[in-house]
Image (cartoon, rainbow, N blue to C red):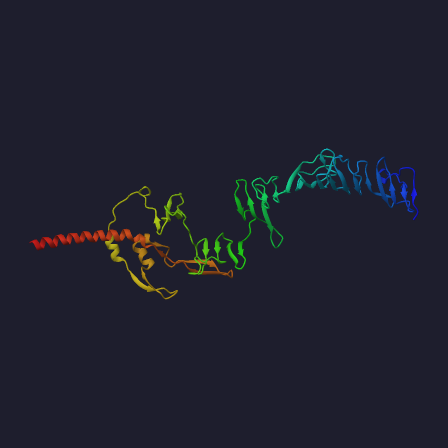
Amino acid sequence: MSLILSGTDGLSDVDGTAATPAIRGTDANTGIFFPSADTIAFAEGGAEVARFDSSGNFGLGVTPSAWNNVFKAVQINAQGCLMATSTTMQMGNNIFYDGAYKFIGTGYASRYYQATGQHVWTVSTASGTAGGAITETQAMTLDASGRLLLGPTSGTGMSANDLGMVNGGSIRFRNAANSAWLNMINVDSSNNLNFGVGGVPTTITFGISGVGEAGRFDTSGNLLVGTTSVNSVGVISVDFLGQTKQGITLDDTWASTGGVYILFRNSAGDTAGRIDHNGTTTVAYTTSSDYRLKENIAPMTGALAKVLQLNPVTYKWKSDGTDGQGFIAHELQAIVPDAVVGAKDAVEEYTDEDGNEQTRIKPQGIDTSFLVATLTAAIQEQQALITQLTARITALESA
């Protein structure tokens, strides 16, 4: 191939004028030419494909924008660019710098740069037009301590390798059908950490290596531990292994004064009852009985007659054949209603592990502590009778 040197600058096709490259081989359409002072361009097939401008910026498939000399830039086609100084390296889309960051063309702009040990990603807050100033948002930062920040620009208060998210941000997962984003974790404007709020999943499960599924929140909001289905009528179900693994353990660190383990409130916010621990070995199951919660207080009457109607029985439990003693719930309910919870012959619907609707009994329960007042009043009535009879016998003997 022969080399031909031309003494005049060639013209690029940018101005619409065809020209022979100044430095070329036997192909007059391919070579290096000089479209203007201090500018080097490259032609192929009679068209300019790249150039170095007078500031040392390189355009590939495009004439470089009017870059400020703070950067040395590589601009690719109409949008992409790579820019660098002695302290930073940047990559961008639809962006150039001439003292301010501006749009190369119409649309959105984005930028990635490395500086002072950080990796930073920015996006334009709105679409712009060619030559317009860009307003950027710093969307993500990997700082020099290895902290990844989504939204915030500073990791103050965070430790190395932490992940930080701006207030109101969320972590979302797309479902298997690729039809919806599920908002799994987010922080709201009140600094509350929420799981599964907005676009919620059907079920949230928790798994442990070697165990598999250890717990879940089901479709009704029930919390299940060690089981995948509700095993009672409550919203919390816990399956355990008896003596080898207890269901629920509550430790009290207040050794001197103890504390309240469980507190029950009514709809008005008043305390209805609680389970207390005294800090050593005693647990108290209490129902509120403060005089300030009561009115129309009067002595109990007719207690002995009620006691005489009670039907204490012995029985065997169907579940394991063990012996028991006590009362039949609906019989006691007819005499002392306060001591019984539930209705006679009640049933409930539930969904089994196979998803089938089933029916089971909803058993009544007894709290014999509510019999104490009746038994006490009955003893008092009985003692009054004993006292009367003793007085009569004494009088008869004296006569």
- Side of 235 where 294 appears, left or right: left
Q: Residue at x 31, y 63 (%)?
A: 314
Can you tell which quarter of the image residue 245 is in? bottom left
- Find residue 80 and report its image quarter: top right
The number of discs equals: 0
Residue at the image position 45 percent from the left and 53 percent from the top: 236
Give residue 162's quadrant in the image.
top right
Spot the residue most to the bottom: 321
Residue 75 in view: yes
Where residue 134 appears, as percent x and y from the top left, is 69, 36
Residue in front for this viewpoint, 73 or 122:
73
**Residue 153 rendering spot, x and y as whole percentages:** 62, 39
Q: Quadrant of the C terminus?
A: bottom left
Is residue 337 visible from the viewing direction of this image? no
The correct choice, above or below, for 134 with respect to 345 in the image is: above
Toward the left, the furthest residue is 399
Q: Is residue 24 left or right of residue 288?
A: right
* Horizontal relation, residue 158 to residue 2: left or right: left
On the image, the x and y values in percent for residue 398 come to 7, 53
Specify whether 15 is left or right of 241: right
Expressed as whole percent of the image width and height from the top left, the position of residue 208 reads 53, 56
Of 129 and 45, which appears nearest the observer?
45
